[in-house]
Image (cartoon, grey):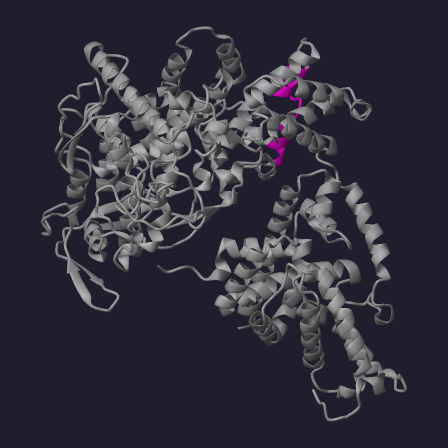
Amino acid sequence: MKSPDASSQPEFFELLEALCEDRLTPVDVQRLEQLVLSSTAARRTYLAYVDLHGTLHWNAAYGADGENFDPAVSGRTSDDDSKNEERKTFRRRPLGLWITAAAVALVGVLSFALGRLFPPDGAGQPVASLGQNRPPAPNDRQIPAVGTSSSGEGQVHEHASVNNAANVNPDSGKPVMLSQQEKSVSVTEGRTPNERVERSKNIDVPPKTSSEIVGSSNVLEPQSVASNGAAAQSTQRSGQRAIEFINEHLAAGWKLYGVEPSPKADDAEWLRRVYLDVVGHIPPVDVAERFLSSRDASRREKLVESLLDDPSYVRNWTIIWTNLLIGRSDSRDVNRPALQKFLRENFARNRPWNELVAEFVSAEGNAAENGAANFLLAHMNNDAMPATAITSRVFLGRQIGCTQCHDHPFNDWKQESFWSLNSFFQQTSVAHADLRDERSGKMKARTTTLETKHVGGPTHFETRRGLMQVTYPKFEGIAVNDDADTNRRQELAKLMTSGEKPLVAESLVNRMWEHFFGCSFTRPVDDMGPHNAPSHPELLDHLAKEFVSSGYDLKQLMRWICLSDAYQRTSRFGKSNEQDDPASGAMPLFSRVYLKGMTAEQLYDSLLLATGADMTPLELGDHDRRRHEWLQQFVHAFQTDENDESVTFESSIAQALLMMNSELTEHALSLDRGTLLEKVVHSRDAEAEKLKRLCLATLTRYPTPKELQTLRKLLNSGSVAQRNNSAGWQDALWAYLNSSEFVLVH
Amino acid sequence: MSDSTNKTAEDASSLDQVPSAEFVQLFTKLQRRLFLFILSQVGSPVDAEEVLQETNVIIWSKFHQFQLGTNFFAWAGMIATYEIRKFRDRRRDRRLQFSDEFLSQVSEDAIEISEELELRREALNECLHRLKPEDRELIQARYAPGENGLRVAEKLGRPSNSVYQSVGRIRKVLFDCVTRRLASAARATT
């Protein structure tokens, strides 16, 4: 795959920055050397950047023209003078009212308090665990490379060791197929290896309805679960069944691996998590207060139902899928608002997932009028190679990007299969036109249209040996007529979204599971396939089939996951399940919910919601636009074969605030009308009550006695009282927002 | 770069000769350039200053080897290159250690584009003036002698990462501004 020159990579600039601040690790130094030596352009950039850094350093000490430099006394005389002068400037600099040394000191206290939140026996999750939640680096574990795939092809490949390592029994060193081990729990009737029907012990599986073509009306009506009687009941039954299957299946895994699952999460932890996962922001303080005081036995079920109907549900999933479909960057030639409008409308009516996928794959028309067209419009560059790779990765969970140049190293995907998928996009073109006012002839707007040309024929590609090869539109071995009269993308949409358990279903289940549990059945989530055996193949398989027979009902799938036993548990872990830690490379057992860092969008929205800094309802487009502008500061887009982009967001409040416009930030931490601080400080409550409210609004829990003590001491300390009475409160709020607990989804 | 005179450093350091006013002028004028040349190969300004001092001592002691009219920077650069390697080999414990290949490639390119770098340094002044006042203040605070990002963060009471972030952003703004200015100047002259 082509890679952009090092001199323009964000990574390169990050390393240069680290060099300027003396923060390079030895590994970084090696990487920097490598990049600098990789091209002349990179070397020039390096020299120019370091030169700029050095010039600033030099000029500050000795002056821009070197006149102050006196060789006889080695140039150090001017040092003190200029230092004093700088100090003066420095002092004149108005300190942001919201970031004070005291607040920073408080952050330390709080982090300590947070550390105590977890079991003190050392088994607890360390506070600064954000980075540990990432997927393991390939070489994290030294386990013999045994490549075994669930379909029993038994390929052995060195590089595939990590993913497959999950299925290696550490004692025997032999591969253990979870699916076989678990036969004791879920009875598996094997007919042929490829055609098994799972039955849970005491549950009848209804005959599967297979929908052949998308758009045929049978199972594909949007299902509104709560509203229609008989159908609702049967859905509820099947929902209960799916939840039980998840529970039994995961419990069997815990038993098999001798793991004791974490206890049930308290309401506060669960509430915050389910809010962030389903609607994308922390719970509003009044909701939290009500929920935490509720004694209703079915309060969790009711909350899930209300969240699935919350307007923010639509907003959240629109954000998530916009990012997956066209990325966060503005650079692509697409109509983002139109795509979001399309997503909003369809998530609002809970449109079946297969129909949505079909819409994206087969979309035609104007970017503004058909929002769905923007997915392909974003990726039709480079001979539709990004379109091919991204369609496969995002909807099918299959990474075939590398097969455009060569056969897949770990499985039997051939180079040809990339190009036969690519062939489906060969009739597609992007047309630009200027829209003119009919009378004046002035240009009104520029339009972009996704069109299908009336052409046929094969697709040509070049093998690595330089041979030209020919291929035809073909998906999973099924060929499609390559004449000009066949609309290939429509055919592809049908092939992708039909069958008993198409890849789109499996891939979506995997993605959804990761979204809620912090880890998917395969890692990475979108690199499924025979080379990467899932941790729970039967569960994945079963959920995918249930998802298909529910009519690709997204809300139903979320309901199953949110109400499963495992999702009720705490993210903390004890001695008995500390080994269940995918971050260290272990196979996930889901005996606890793994920690996730907030996304940039979650952080932005939660921050505004918690502080009351922006009273614009989150659902309004205005808010989306502002957040999007804010986000652009972190995003870099590349015109690579997969249209990659990098996001340099680190999930830190400090970064988030600093990158916001200062007015908004100051407002967030001010006592202006309508802000959280204003309401808290001006209420008639006692100090302890005020602090409780502050904590609940930000961390969705009540403060610990230790925190209360520390904060009260701070509020009443001399230095704070002297400044003014609101500074202490600002410090307290700043400390809560800046805690690692705030930026984690736990 | 003539080594034709056979006098050794010891001879010169006896200071029985005094460098010409022209030499002193050249020497003074090229200090910054030399410092930046060294910096590109040692990475840290503090280390670069140390190497510069050592280089200066050698330059001073060998002034009679330099023939006026030849390229002073090239001559001094040779001495610096030697001192850079000496410094590196003496400070094996340093985190920042560049390989021989890196040093020779970078020094070669640095000399090749030294005129362009000089133009960039001039453009930088202009770009500094175009910064937003608060950005300029922050970058001044960061580069005040003896300062670094961490200490500025402590003083401002800001988290260090946020200061790194801001300072980095401003540096990138300056870098892009300089590049743009040079490009437009180049367009204007062609």
Quarter of the figure that contains the N terminus of chain A: bottom left
- Identified at 51% across, 39% down, the residue is A132
Q: Main secondary structure of the magenta part?
A: helix
- Front residue of A94 and B97: B97
Residue A664 colored in magenta in the image: yes
Say which quarter of the image contains residue B43. Answer: bottom right
Circle count: 0
Relative image position of residue B82 (x, y in whole percent): 69, 76
The answer, for residue A462, to whether it is visible in the render is yes
Relative image position of residue B174 (x, y in whole percent): 62, 56
The answer, for residue A427, to whether it is visible in the render is no
In the rendered image of this protein, does residue A529 appear above or below residue A547?
below
Relative image position of residue A487 (x, y in whole percent): 14, 45
Say which quarter of the image contains residue B11. Answer: bottom right
List the single residue furthest toward the top: A295
List the single residue furthest toward the front: A172
Relative image position of residue A584 (x, y in whole percent): 46, 41
Please indicate whether residue B3 sits to the left or right of residue A534 in the image. right
- Identified at 28% across, 53% down, the residue is A156
Residue B39 colored in magenta in the image: no
- Front residue of B118 and A310: A310
Q: What stretch is highlighted in magenta?
A: A662-681
- Front residue of A437 and A672: A672
Please indicate whether residue A198 sits to the left or right of residue A481 in the image. right
